Image: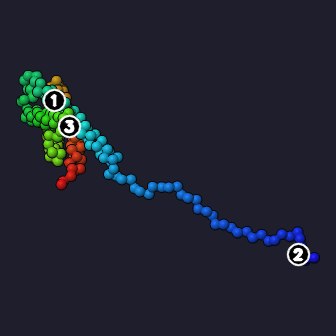
């Protein structure tokens, strides 16, 4: 009857659907706030660490300066082996005393501030005093040690004795005090540079 084959099915039309986009996971595109609570807590921890570090360094410098002073002041072995007969050693002793007074005052101030939670000086003024004082004392310590080193080396050419050994011990303690004060000067310089000027 019909000329179309009954076994043949109608032509199939294939329609391709465009690929569906998978939804991206939700991402918070906001940048984290640096001034939030976490930032404030980090700053407080950093300031607390700097205060404790400065106090520790000054306390150690006080100890080294005190040892240096005691060792040099007790360096009296009779005749030419007395420290007060040499200008370099007298200068060394005077700077040791200044270092003891400065570091002792700073340690007292910082311990007082920690224990009472009150600042004795305004933060900006304290930062300036710390920085200038640390710089001056560090310079004086290294200059007194260098003048005493040259005298001690000249004396050691004639031979080692208890006088030169004791002088060397005092000088080494003064150099350790200088290193502590120099590190404290770095901290106080950082504190000064972060002070607001308004």
Residue name at image x 93 percent, y 76 percent: 1
Residue name at image x 17 percent, y 40 percent:
119
Q: Sequence order check: which comes first, mark 1 or mark 2? A: 2
- Can you say whether 148 is above or below 36 in the image? above
Classify mark 1: helix, strand or loop: helix
Crowding at dot 1, Cα within 10 Å, few <14 / some 14-19 / many 20+, comes out as many
Q: Give the foreground label among 2 and 3.
A: 2
Which numbered circle lies on residue 57?
none
Is 151 drawn above or below residue 135 in the view shown? above
Secondary structure beneath dot 2 equals loop
Residue at x 33% of width, y 50% of height: 36
**Residue 7 at least partly seen:** yes
- State how far apart marks 2 and 3 are (Cα): 103 Å
Between marks 1 and 3, how big is the CA–CA gap? 28 Å
The single residue placed furthest to the front in the displayed view is 1
Quadrant location of residue 7?
A: bottom right
Residue 196 % position (x, y):
21, 52
The residue beneath circle 2 is: 4
Give the mark nearest the N terminus, 1 or 3: 1
Q: Which residue is mark 1?
A: 66
Closer to us: 134 or 170:
134
Helix, strand or loop under label 3: loop
Pointers 2 and 3 in contact (CB under 8 A)? no
Between 111 and 17, the one lying in front of the other is 17
Mark 3, residue position:
117
Q: What residue is at 89 percent from the left and 71 percent from the top?
A: 6
Where is the C terminus found, in terms of image quarters? bottom left
In the image, 52 versus 25, the foreground residue is 25
Residue 2, image x, y percentages: 91, 76
Distance between mark 1 and mark 2 Cα atoms: 118 Å
Say how the picture is coloured.
rainbow
| Viewer-proximal residue among 45 and 118 | 118
């Amino acid at each position: 009857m019909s000329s179309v084959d009954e076994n043949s099915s109608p032509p199939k039309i294939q329609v391709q659907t465009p690929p569906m986009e998978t939804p991206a996971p939700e991402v918070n595109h906001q940048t984290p706030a640096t001034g939030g609570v976490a930032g404030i807590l980090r700053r407080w921890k950093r300031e607390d660490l700097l205060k404790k570090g400065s106090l520790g360094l000054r306390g150690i410098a006080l100890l080294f300066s005190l040892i240096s002073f005691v060792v040099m002041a007790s360096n009296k072995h009779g005749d030419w082996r007395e420290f007060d007969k040499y200008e370099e050693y007298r200068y060394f002793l005077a700077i040791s005393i200044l270092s003891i007074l400065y570091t002792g005052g700073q340690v007292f101030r910082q311990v007082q501030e920690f224990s009472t939670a009150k600042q004795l000086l305004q933060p900006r003024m304290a930062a300036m005093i710390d920085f200038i004082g640390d710089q001056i004392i560090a310079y004086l310590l290294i200059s007194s040690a260098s003048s005493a080193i040259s005298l001690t080396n000249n004396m050691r050419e004639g031979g080692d004795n208890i006088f030169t050994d004791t002088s060397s011990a005092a000088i080494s303690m003064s150099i350790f005090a200088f290193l502590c004060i120099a590190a404290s000067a770095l901290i106080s310089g950082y504190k000064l540079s972060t002070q607001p000027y308004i």
